[in-house]
Image (cartoon, rainbow, N blue to C red):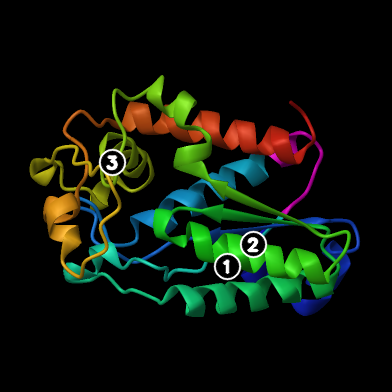
């Protein structure tokens, strides 16, 4: 169930029997010339929807919170449409959301992250709130990292706006994908270089992978295995 669709009495009733809330977090940023700026939110939102659906079939309920759309995306801020939020600001904002859910009585809060730049701010926010609320568990799931082995059994490569993300978007919102513009290559650096314009070097046109082999079928397979595994983790299965 989506929290924003509930009335407060409905929410009050549900939280008496539901102990887990899922909070999708993403970013608004360039994803090549072929994917929409909201890719990093569309993906975790769809995964959250599928997780809830699977858990319902297993006789378990979770609540899905409205997503955090904006994230920390310093590197890609060189491209139009990228809206970068400072890491301290993102940490503080998410920390307050987590505090509120903890105060409401939820025992497990799942941060379902869709953007790499969010990892450190989310981790720090989670640590602060977990320290304040004994008995509250906060999970940080980076779907493309934590299930990399599964994804690479489906795709031959993965990367920003790459084969995996493009496949997922073809499965979710194909009308927003411009496959005629889907091109790129893998770029790496021996050390992490922090420079204002480093994004143009590491992410030419906002891509770091070859997305040309992406398909909706691969995206559906990724969404299926990731949502199934997250649902089983929440349900306490291995």
Q: Quadrant of residue 211?
A: top left
Eyeballing the image, is 45 above or below 132? above
Q: Are marks 2 and 3 in contact (CB under 8 Å)?
A: no
CB-based contact (under 8 Å), mark 1 and mark 3: no
User: Is disc 3 placed on a helix, strand or loop?
Assistant: helix
Helix, strand or loop at disc 2? loop
Say which of 138 and 106 sits in front: 138
Q: Secondary structure at mark 1?
A: loop
Residue reaching furthest to the front: 191
Q: Is residue 40 magenta?
A: no
Tell me where the magenta segment starts and ends, as one range. 54-62
Q: Residue at x 27, y 63 (%)?
A: 194
Dot 2 or dot 1: first in sequence order is 2
For the residue carrying disc 1, how many other residues have a C-alpha within 10 Å: few (<14), some (14-19), or many (20+)?
some
Give the mark nearest the N terminus, 2 or 3. Answer: 2
Callout 2 touching callout 1 (CB < 8 Å): yes
Give the residue number, with chain letter if any, for mark 3.
Answer: 166
Label 1: which residue? 66
Residue 33 in sight: no
Q: Nearer the viewer, residue 25 or 195?
A: 195
């Amino acid at each position: 169930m989506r929290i924003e669709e509930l009335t407060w009495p409905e929410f009050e009733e549900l939280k008496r029997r539901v102990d887990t809330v899922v909070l999708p977090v993403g970013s608004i940023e360039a994803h090549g010339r072929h994917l929409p700026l909201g890719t990093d939110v569309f993906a975790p939102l769809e995964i959250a929807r599928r997780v809830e659906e699977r858990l319902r079939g297993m006789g378990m309920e979770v609540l899905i919170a409205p997503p955090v759309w904006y994230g920390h995306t310093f590197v890609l801020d060189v491209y139009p449409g990228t809206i970068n939020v400072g890491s301290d600001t993102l940490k503080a904002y998410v920390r307050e959301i987590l505090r509120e859910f903890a105060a409401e009585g939820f025992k497990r809060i799942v941060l379902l992250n869709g953007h790499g730049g969010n990892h450190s701010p989310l981790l720090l926010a989670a640590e602060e709130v977990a320290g304040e609320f004994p008995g509250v568990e906060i999970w940080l799931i980076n779907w493309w990292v934590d299930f990399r082995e599964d994804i690479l059994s489906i795709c031959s490569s993965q990367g920003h706006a790459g084969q995996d993300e493009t496949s997922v978007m073809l499965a979710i919102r194909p009308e927003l994908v411009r496959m005629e513009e889907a091109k790129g290559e893998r770029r790496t650096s021996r050390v992490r270089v922090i420079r204002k314009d480093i994004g143009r070097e590491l992410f030419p046109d906002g891509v770091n992978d070859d997305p040309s082999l992406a398909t909706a079928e691969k995206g559906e397979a990724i969404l299926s295995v990731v949502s199934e595994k997250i649902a089983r983790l929440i349900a306490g299965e291995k």
